[in-house]
Each structure stands twice: as structure tokens, then as C-alpha cells.
Image (tube, grey):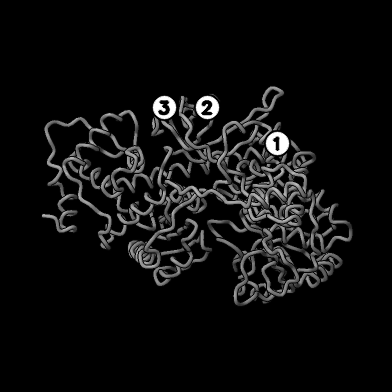
Amino acid sequence: MAHKKWIIAHADKEKASQLSEKLNIDPFIAFLLVSRGIDDELSASDFLTEGCAFTSPYSLKDMDKAVSRINEALENGEKICIYGDYDCDGVTATALLYSFFESMGGDVMYFIPDRLTDGYGMNISAVEKIKALGTDLIITVDNGIASVKEAEHIYSLGMELIVTDHHQIPKELPRACAVINPHRTDNNIKFRDFAGVGVAFKLACALYDGDISDLLEQYADLVTLGTIGDMVPLKNENRGFVSAGLKLINNNSRTGIEALRRVAGNIDNELTSVDAAFQLCPRINAAGRMDSASKAVELLLCDDYEEARFKAEQLNIENTHRHEVENNIADDIRSIISEKPSLAQARVLVIAGRNYHHGVIGIAAAHLVSAYGKPAIVIGIDDDGKCTGSARSIDGFNIFEAISYCSDLLTHFGGHPLAAGLGIEQDNIDAFREKINEYALNQYPVMPAPSLNLDCKLSPFYLNTELVDNLSALEPYGADNPQPVFGLYNVKLAGVTPMGDGRHIRMEIQKKGKTFKIARFNTSVADFPYRVGDMLDIAIKVSKNFYKGKYYLSIMAEDVRLNGIDDDKYFSQKNEMELFKCGYSAQGITCPDRHTFAGVYRFLKSNSDLNYTTDDLYFAMRQQLSYSTVSFVLQAFCETGIISLDNGRIKLNATEGKADLENTNVIKILKGRLNIE
């Protein structure tokens, strides 16, 4: 995992104290609210109050037109097609409107494009298929706002269109009876960050004559999963949707969601927003990634429990398959980087491989960002030469603008500051890699540091189930309201044991006589670069598990580091080295001498039981050597066979005789750059 800069939130303690007194809430919760910008009595009261004041659906522009046209279609028995999308948001929105129109006696069907053959959004071929099925009116959910050409084709075939979407507004709107999108500037609303399923729910509310609470009892579970799955801010009405939906899921959810919970192994515990995000939404998404998203819609619409169990198992199998495909791509990427390490040293990682599944390359790119702390683009090259790429970025680096700079090399592209997609000819991949890194060097002379936001430092003496109970006031967690992360500083590592077939570890931690255990996932004992007795800083999340009639505290490590790390020094020195390698300034760069080589070798030999990465070694040596010095020493060691690198981890080799390190190519080139005789 890439080293991250820890950023501790600041809060006005006086404001927090006043908030605690006025609202009669726990002082610690008041402190956390203020640190998150919820620092006045009204906003805090709204945040903590159950329920929500939902705005009128008619506050959305064109809602009246949509209602009029849909009612006409229902009265005349016209065939309505819900045109969805293949992700969790699109699937839940499709299921919601299909179910709603069916309950109103409508002649309704749904269509979701195939990720591999149809691509995202509307397309001409799909429109013609829908027309052939006798459709009169198409209603989009979670897509359609940019489908200008497709909309004209819909009308040329004698059908009509209503667009409901939540993506950004393009310069030209598609031809339609109504275009409902919260980002339209002519809407009479303040909160605009709905998911596609939230917009679909607003349409259902406008068509429904009764109280909104009736519809929440029927559909809040679907709105919840789509809202969480699309990672829109859990504020305002979205928070109200998810609060109502979690209650429904935990008390009287639909058959399909209950079956999905069972195959995910979460049927006894109360489901939280975090559980939904990590257990249910990925399984719904897996259908669209690996096969057909219609399977997920069928599950959500299913009333028969045995049938639902079968369909849920299918999604579970697809999710398992997705993990396998992910792992295969990850293994291939590691092999590519091992053969050509310079790919990982670039400011923007661009990795291309054969037959990467299009439904998984975005996840693969996200894993690279997590591993290297840099923007990453993964490109899949199909047998027919077609190349599809998916990009993910870090906060502060606009990947969409970077890709736009290379538009002359692409067949198509689109996206946002943190995520994007592209098409490219295979012959242009190398040129694209070079050009996007040229852009990164020119526009970002200092690359943004990947960061981890901590709510506050915490004493281990506050770690108990009561803390988790108090924190529940902040739920549901999600985008813009994350699960709290706390920093435990200067704690002693007292033990490490494997768990989960060795893929994870459990740390035993001590401080001032108190001992507690912390799980660290996706880290094996062999890859854990610390030993018993080390003083650590650990960023944690807390929850509780129910086991044999009792609740137990569960602590999970988000990040682990040696106590006393200087983040600013690390990122500054690493940036200096990257600029130097790209031919820029030699500021801060020094050439290692015999004393330095000997010192690093002795340190590695005395710690040969720990599998260090370059970063681990740099920190283990307490940042006494610059990052570039450590890197050049290791390169010289590699060149002479003193060490080898296995997936980035240092292995000390058995060697005979003395190596002439100062005459290695890497050191000779370095001396030449630094004008050293």
C-alpha cells in the first residue's frame, strides 16, 4: 500500500462545547460534528434528527411534463420501457420504476445495455430493439442526459422519450417530452446531489397521490442501495433516504435483498450503510460487470424466496468470478511492472495488457492507485485490437483534464476529475503514456500526496462498545460523511498472528497497561514490516460484532506506520527524486558513498527476517538517509546481485566477495548527472 499523509481534522472546541450544551448531545459527538463542518445548532439538529423534510418532486424542472405524458401512456395502455444502466444505481432505479409502473397497471418492460457489447448509456441498436418490441415511450434512469443522437432516432421511429438522470448537464439537451435532472440550473432546489435512483424515486412520488411515507415503505431499500452504491453525498435528502431504507432492510425488506444478505453472510447482524457498501452493492454491481445486469434486476423484483435464493447465489458466483478476474489482472500487472519497473516510476501509471475484462479494469486501476499513490490507467487490449481503458486518480490530480490533453491520441474519452474512461488504438498506447506524463510533469511539478483523513487522536482507554454506540449518532456513513477514523499514537506492538488463511493479521497492541487487538486486512505476517517491540501509530475504525448473545468491540487498522514519521519530508524527497529521474533539477540529490552502502547493507542483514519495500526501509532507517539515496543504493545492490526484488520487496541474496558498487551503471550515471569525478 502507498504511504499516505495523515491529516487530522481541526475543530473549534468552544463551538463543540456550545453545541453539546444546546443540543444535549455527547461532547465527543459534538466535536466530531464541528470537525466535519456541521457547526451550528440548526445544521447539527437537522443532521441528527431522524427523518427528513423531502422537497416536492415538482421542484425539479419538467416534472409536470413527465407526469402528464406518463399518465397519458398509462391511460391509453401504451408500452413503456425503462432504459437503465448496468451499475448498482441504474439497476435499483430500473427495479424501482418497473415495480412502480407495474403496480399502477402499466404495460411496462425494462432494458439494460450490456457493458461489453452495448457500452454505457443509450445506443442506436438498443433503441431499435426496443422499438421492435412495440414500445411507445422510453424512460431513462441514471443515463440519457447526453444522448442527443439517440433521442432523435427514438422520435424518428415514432417513439417518445423522458430522461431522468443525475449526471452533469451537457451543452445540448436531448429531445424529450421531459428532461429531469437535479443539476439543471432552472430547478427550484438547493440540494442537487441525488443518485439516479433518487431522481427515479422523485418521479414516482410525483406520480403518486398519497403520502411520500407510503412510497418510502415500499422503495426506500432500493433507493438506499443505489444511493450508497453510487457514492453520492449522504447529506440532506440522501441521508433521509438511506436512514429509512436501512430500517426497511433490517425489518421488512423485499425478498431479493434478504436473499442477497444471506449469501453475503449478513442475516443475523443489523445491516449498516458500511455493510451495504461492501457486501450488497458489489454483488449487484457484479452482475453488470461480469454478465448481465438484468440478473440483478430480476433478483430485486423476485417475490418467491427459493427463486430469490437461487438468483442471489448466481450474483454471489458472479462476484466471486469478479474477484478471480481481478486477481488475474493484478498478477499480470505485477508481472508487467516487474519486467519494466520504470512503468511504476512514472507520475501517471499506464498499464496495458491482453484481454483484460472491461468490467474490472476500473477496479484494477483503483488498486494501482492504492498501491502506488499515483493516478493510474489500465488498458485492456482485445484480440480484435480494440483497446479500452479505465482511469482512477488521487485527490488534487484531475485525471479527466490530463486525458483531455491527449485527446488527439484517443478514439473517445469521458469522465470526471477522479475517474475516466477512454478508447485508444494499440499503436498509440506508448505515445499516450508519454504524453500524459508530460502533462503531469508540466502541470503538477509537485504531485498531490495521497492522504488519509483522521477525525482525531484517540486514547486507547476510550476503545469500548460504548464508543461505537455513541458514534451511531453519525450514521448512516457514506460519501461526505465517512465512518470516523481515529489515530492511536505511540503504541507498542506486542504480537502478530495470522488470520483468514494467512491473508490477514491480528496485531496485539499495548499502551500504559492496556492491551487490545486490531485486525489488519490484506497484509500477511510475511509482508508485515514491523516486529514485536516496535512503537507504532495506527489509524483505526471501530465497530462491534454480535457473537453468542454478546456484542464485542471490533477494531480495524486503516493504516500502520512507525511512530514519528515525517510525512512532509517523505513526499518532498520522493518528488525530488522523481523530478531528477525525469531530467529536472538535482536539488536534494546526493550520491551514496562506501559508508552509506555499508550502513544500508548492515541494516538489511540485521533485519533480514522482515520483507521491506523501499518505503519500508526508508522509514525503518528513521529517514536518516534521503529517499533518493535509499533508492539508488538499492538499485546498485540489485545490479550487483546483493539483493533481488520480489513484487517490490527486498530479498538479501547470498554473495561471495566484495561488489564494486561505485562502478555500477546506476552510480556512474548518477555521478555524471551530478558532475562528480
In-image side of 19 versus 120 (left or right): right
Residue 61 percent location from the top left of the image: 75, 72
Kind of residue at badge 1 = Asp
Label 2 is placed on what type of residue? Lys
Q: Nearer the viewer, mark 1 or mark 2?
A: 2
- The residue nearer to you, when weighing 294 against 47, is 47
**Disc 3 to disc 1, C-alpha distance:** 32 Å
Q: CA distance from mark 1 to mark 2?
A: 25 Å
Residue found at x 46% / y 29% = 492
* Quadrant where the N terminus is found in the figure: top left
Q: Position of residue 73 (x, y in %)?
A: 81, 67
- The picture places residue 538, in percent across and down from the top left corner, at 50, 37
Q: Are marks 2 and 3 in contact (CB under 8 Å)?
A: no
Residue corresponding to mark 1: 469
Residue located at (60% from left, 39% from top):
316
Distance Cα–Cα, label 2 vs label 3 = 14 Å
Q: Percent from the top left, x then y, of residue 356?
A: 44, 51
Quarter occupied by residue 319: top right
Query: Which image quarter is the C terminus in?
Result: bottom left
The answer to whether residue 33 is seen in the rendering is yes
Read off the residue under disc 2.
512
According to the image, label 3 marks what residue? 533
| Residue, far right | 210
- Contact between labelled residues 1 and 3, with CB atoms less than 8 Å apart: no
For badge 3, the amino acid type reads Gly
